[in-house]
Amino acid sequence: MTNITYSKMNSQGNDFILVDSSISEVKLLPDLAKSFLIQNINYDQLLYVELSKSDELVTCSILNRDGSVAKQCGNGLRAIMLYFNNRYGYKAINIEVCGTKYKVKFKDTENITVQMGKTQPLAISERECGVVIPTEQFHKQSECIDNITEDIVFYLVDIGNQHCVILDKHIPDDKHKIIQHLNKNYNNQFNIEFLENLTEYINGNSQTLILSVYERGAGWTDSCGSGATAAASVIFYSYPEVSSTGSVSVQQKGGLLSVFKEPNGLLYLSGPSTLEYEASIYV
């Protein structure tokens, strides 16, 4: 049995288990991810971090609770920044996830900002079933789903991980059918976002974009940082007339996140994170 020390972090209802390799070294991360659930410690993602003090670079492996690897997590990156501020006093760090580096800055616990990079639009391949490919422009796409009256309309976006941003509001039963259809036909590769008030937002009747997210490997979540960024990117590039300020406020069940776009296309995600407690388990 090995004693693993961990920090329970929370970014607006998005729950994380953070394990610092300098305190607890782990070799089999998928087994560790499942061990927390076996011991009834609920979470969305496991963050395994390693600090290289020479250049303030943190290498991070992100695992969903089913043991699958996540390539990006904006809320998780903010949680990591809070952890390294609390423990080591850092105000800014670079976090590397799956070979991509993200700059993260700490102002206070309510304002932690991640440079999320640029979005890559995707489109469904016309040649291969269930395959998506990079494209130059954002393309509005649609699919027919059994037992749903109207086609679903969506954009596909890669922001380190892949997202399907669905434009129309749907009732809960239809959402379940949509998720099943997309997971089956695209091999569970998307986080799936539902824009709940797009019409009101683009008409100026709402100042915040309301979003609900089904995360790959984790299920429904109170908050998803990369999902908020993907949804905001759709607004920036497809509805520029309502995002002339270069910012979009995204409301999820867990709270409000802000997404900013620079003229060069770089996107930034800003919001809070908290440390709930620190503990250890034997695995």
Image (cartoon, rainbow, N blue to C red):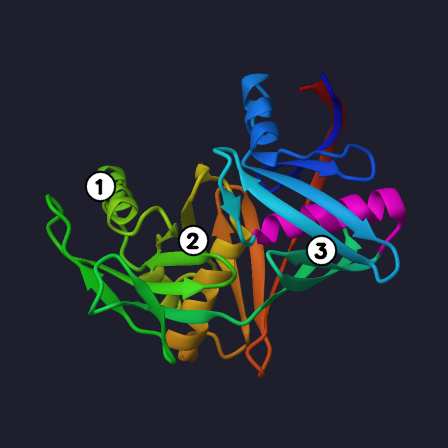
Which mark, by number, is residue 210?
2
Q: Which residue is mark 1?
A: 177
Specify whether residue 165 is painted magenta. no
The crowd level at tag 1 (other Cα within 10 Å; few <14, some 14-19, many 20+) is some
Q: Which residue is mark 3?
A: 111
Range drawn in magenta? 73-90
- Residue 179 in picture, x, y percent from top left: 29, 44
Which mark, by number, is residue 138?
none
Q: Quadrant of residue 13?
A: top right
Q: Secondary structure at mark 2?
A: strand
Q: Is residue 191 visible?
A: yes
Q: How many marks?
A: 3
The crowd level at tag 3 (other Cα within 10 Å; few <14, some 14-19, many 20+) is some
The disc, 3 or 2, on the residue closer to the chain's N-terminal end is: 3
The disc, 1 or 2, on the residue closer to the chain's N-terminal end is: 1
Q: Secondary structure at mark 3?
A: strand
- Residue 129 in picture, x, y percent from top left: 21, 59
Q: Is residue 146 left or right of residue 221?
A: left
